[in-house]
Amino acid sequence: MLNNFWYAVEHSQALATKPKSVVLMDQEIVLYRQSSGEIIALENRCAHRGTALSGGWVEESCIRCPYHGWKYDYDGSCTEIPANQPGVSIAHRAKLRAYPIQEKYGLIWLYFGDLPAQDRPSLPPLPAFSNPNWRTVRGEFTWDGHYTRVIANTVDMAHAAFVHASAFGRKEKPRIQHYELEQEAWTARATIHFKTKPAHFLKLILGNSPPDGSITSSFFLPNITQVYHRFGNIEFILFLAHVPVSNEQTITKWLHLRNFVTHPLFDSFMKRDVAKTFVQDNSVVKLQPVGPVPKLRDELHVPSDALELAYRKLREQYQTTPIAGKS
Ligand code: FES
Ligand SMILES: [Fe+2]
């Protein structure tokens, strides 16, 4: 994982009153909502016997371990050991790592690093989320692959002709036009234009003479990719948070935002289309070697890989030189 970045790890609505664990590269973290509604994230191992606190319960700002009832406050410090006689002090080591949290776009973002608040990177923009003319649906998908392979797939410009041939990909038109990269500190994007071959639900909307389309793909370190589609006036966005579960597994918490047929009645069509697309993508991701993308020099690259390469280069750069504080 890259240090000093915000990771989107869960949908806000998935965390109600019960604590919930999320796994980031085999490390378990417990999320819980204080009675005020604010979310707390602590390492999910009781300092006593390693019990998962996600099996416990919330008491105001605190979480209590289900085994012997040790109570931990929002900063991870243990504030009560019920079996102790009065006056027995609590060891300083009875403290769990606490992670800064924020909620945005209906997602829970966890800060994995040690920089003070003012030095942390900002979250990606998503203006369509608060635009009343757009409708958002959300879901999740489990991949059989490392999150860097999943990210590489979702910003890959050349696979649709093959992987999505039975849907929107056109096997007879595999060439990718030269595209320009627009790159900033921890993001890059690229746009390609193409003749539309709408699939799934879009076919019903766009009919037999669809307008030309364009796709703008982007990534935002460490774990967000976004695909923006436009067909004439029809626009939709896939905003994807790829949760790095382990070397073999990634869970993508996704948002699909659209500016057409915004009635909730159509939500299930959108969800189905997203799921179908991910199933096709996963069919090739799971055929790749287990673990993270290798060093660039260990694979071959062609011009259409430019956006994916930008991701891999930036990732390598921040792996060797993590973001540093300004002060
Ligand atoms: S294991 Fe958590 S209180 Fe004993
Ligand atoms: Fe794909």
Image: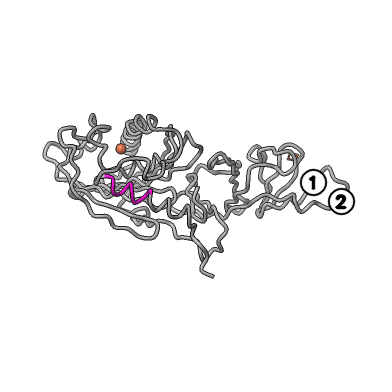
Residue 210 coordinates in the image, percent (x, y): 14, 41
Q: Is mark 1 within 8 Å of ligand 1?
A: yes
Nearer-N-terminus badge (1/2): 1
Q: Which numbered marker is on residue 215?
A: none
Closer to us: 291 or 221:
291
Residue 246 coordinates in the image, percent (x, y): 51, 37
Q: Which residue is mark 1?
A: 81
- Left or right: 91, with 13 as reference point: right
Secondary element at tag 2? loop
Q: Can residue 207 be found in the magenta stretch? A: no
> At x 56% / y 43%, what residue is drawn?
16
C-alpha distance separating marks 1 and 2:
9 Å
Q: Can residue 310 be found in the magenta stretch? A: yes
Secondary element at tag 1? loop
Residue 20 appears in view:
no
Give the residues drawn in magenta, as a range.
305-312
